[in-house]
Amino acid sequence: MQLTDRRLPGWFRQAWATYVTETARFTDAESDAYRSITPARIINRTMVVVFLTGTVSLLVINFFAKTTGWIPGLLSQVGLDSWSGRATAAFGTSERAQLYQLTVWTGVQLVAYVVLPVAAIRWLLRLPLREFGVRLRGTSSHWRVYVALYAISLPLIVWASRSDAFLAKYPFYRLGEAENFWPVMGIWWVMYAAQFVALEFFFRGFMVHGLKGRLGYAAIFAMVLPYTMIHFGKPLAEATGAILGGITLGTLSLRTRSVWWGAALHVAVAGTMDVLALSQQGVL
């Protein structure tokens, strides 16, 4: 994991040593120490709970976040036919149909990415939530590396924003003819940011910190596989970038023991993508 090539800038080699080499070393050392004093059944149980909870969470997102058809059907099955009709109209023909649909999308992701993992942590694993990357103390000193990552990402985002594939996907929310920019976009951006925070907790908190006891630094790569897969259907450059982004944010989560700066970076990048797409289309 060490970079010793003198042709690379000194600041890059120092950052690599601090945030990659040292992170991998102490994570693997902590994992070895944990396995030496913890019964194998407990270690394996934790790993199985994390993997199964993650699987269920992604299953919920796939079948309940991408469509709203299940809501009228569920209401009808429990005898609430009038409410079923209202839901069908709200999600299908109302002026705010897209906003209502994306409200469900956000809500389902918050349940899948936060509620289910937290329930697993508290009731199945019986572990403190702070061990899964939600601490704040001691994280403020790392802000510079996240700002640097945003600065590196910005020109790539600007370049990608000029492609047809990018504009076909973004902005994520398409304003209807009868919708005003405010407050609709403001409401949407709050929900959009919330789901990115939830996503960071799930992948870089629950999965990485939940698996590091068994897998050490390799927990990052176990997380990157499903993280890349949720980007299928997006532009190739973005889906490919998810591999590097997942490894980078996973490593930083292990280093800082926190997902908050990573969530802030993710929100900033996604917000920039939306703003650039809106600008390209002349909305801004």
Image (cartoon, rainbow, N blue to C red):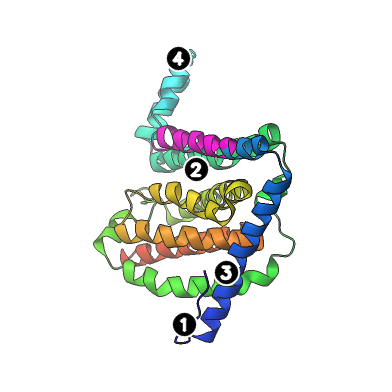
The tag on residue 77 is 4
Secondary structure mostly seen in the magenta stretch: helix
Question: For the residues marked 1 and 4, what is the alpha-carbon distance in whole angstroms?
Answer: 65 Å
Q: Nearer the viewer, residue 50 or 263?
A: 50
Q: Residues within 10 Å of mark 1 (few under 14, many from 20)?
A: few
Mark 4 or 3, nearer chain start? 3
Tell whether 281 sits left or right of 29. left
Quadrant placement of the C terminus: bottom left
Q: Nearer the viewer, residue 79 or 95?
A: 79
Q: Are marks 1 and 3 in contact (CB under 8 Å)?
A: no
Instruction: Please state the extent of the stretch shown in magenta in the rendering.
Output: 48-66
Tell whether 273 sits left or right of 256. left
Mark 1 or 3, nearer chain start? 1
Q: State yes or no: residue 61 in magenta.
A: yes
Mark 1 or 4, nearer chain start? 1
Q: Quadrant of residue 128?
A: top right
Q: Residue 232, image x and y in percent?
A: 34, 48
Mark 2 or 3, nearer chain start? 3
Residue indicated by mark 2: 106
Residue at 59 percent across and 42 percent down: it is 114
**Amino acid carrying mark 4 in the image:** Gln
Mark 4 or 2, nearer chain start? 4
Residue that extends furthest to the left in the rendered view of this protein: 164
Q: Nearer the viewer, mark 1 or mark 2?
A: 1
Q: Residue 86, image x and y in percent?
A: 43, 26
Q: Secondary structure at mark 1?
A: loop
* Looking at the image, residue 68 lies above or below residue 218: above
Residue at 57 percent across and 36 percent down: it is 48
Q: Nearer the viewer, mark 4 or mark 3?
A: 3
Tell whether 24 sits left or right of 239. right
